Amino acid sequence: MIAAANAAPGMDWGLLDIFEKGGPLMWALLFLSTIALMVFFVCLWTTRESAVLPVKMVLSVESCFRRKDYAGLLSMCEKDGSSFARTVHVIVLFMQRNPRAAIDEVREVATAEGSRQANILTRQINWLSDIGSIAPMIGLLGTVVGMMRTFMEMASGNFEGVKQMQMAGGIAEAMITTVGGLVLAIPSMAAYVFFRSRVQKRITDMEVAITHILSVVAVQMDHEKRLSATYNLGRKQELMEEDES
């Protein structure tokens, strides 16, 4: 009867009671949980398709490049704000400021800006990986602190009455913080794996789109060079005919 009465209150523990018995390190886990939740929703928003590579915009950008409507391209990119739009914006600005630039130089600019946009997306989801790594360490620290309390009570040599309750409290703190760290780490790592796969797909799709746009630019540059060479050759022949006459 006495054992049952002593066990009954333990069965009525709520989340708040468990949190309090976990010790001060539970506040650190709560803080990390809040950050993880915020990062999750931010990544959910910034890695969506329309924020990285809007399909309709790819077609519009290609059309503008074929028409050489650079002013329209800049205006479109400034209004959109996606990763693809920011990359195209940098490419167009470079081409406007360097009209005689070769296609290899344009590719270098596109690669640099594309890498920067990819790093922005990757850096955001890395927060989830970091939280998933730190949370179990905090839980382990709580375990060590709780066990230290328990062994200190055992070293006091008094195992009766209140001392037994204090030992149980130390063990409970050790277990609760361990569980708390794992409860935070597992969803954080799962979310990181999900967003990592999503970001890799978005980056690959954007690389394909940028490569296609650059191929259009390369064809235009080659065509312009041929026209310029033909014009210069014709002009040279005209001058030679005038000299002969």
Image: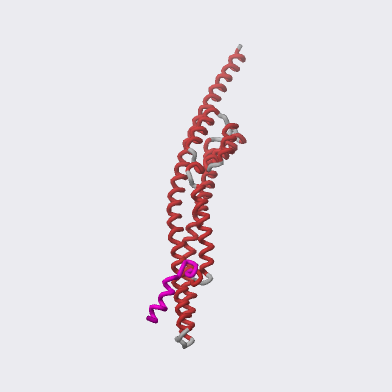
Magenta stretch: includes residue 40: no
For the point 53% across and 71% down, the residue is 24
Q: Outermost residue toward the top?
A: 245
In front of the other: 97 or 100? 97
Residue 41, horizontal then vertical, whole percent: 50, 52
How many marks are shown on the rendered structure?
0
For the point 45% across and 69% down, the residue is 178
The segment highlighted magenta reads 1-18
Mark yes or no: residue 238 visible: yes
Q: Quadrant of residue 8?
A: bottom left
Placement of 138 over or under 224, stated as above or below: below
Q: Quadrant of the N terminus?
A: bottom left
In front of the other: 134 or 3? 3
Predominant secondary structure, magenta span: helix
Residue 48, horizontal then vertical, whole percent: 48, 45
Q: Outermost residue toward the bottom?
A: 157
Tell me, what colour scheme is on the image?
secondary structure
For the point 41% across and 78% down, the residue is 5
Left or right of 86 on screen, residue 154: left
Placement of 198 over or under 213, stated as above or below: below
Residue 33, horizontal then vertical, whole percent: 50, 61
Residue 12, horizontal then vertical, whole percent: 44, 70
Q: Quadrant of the C terminus?
A: top right
Mark yes or no: residue 108 visible: no
Left or right of 230 on screen, residue 8: left
In front of the other: 189 or 225? 189
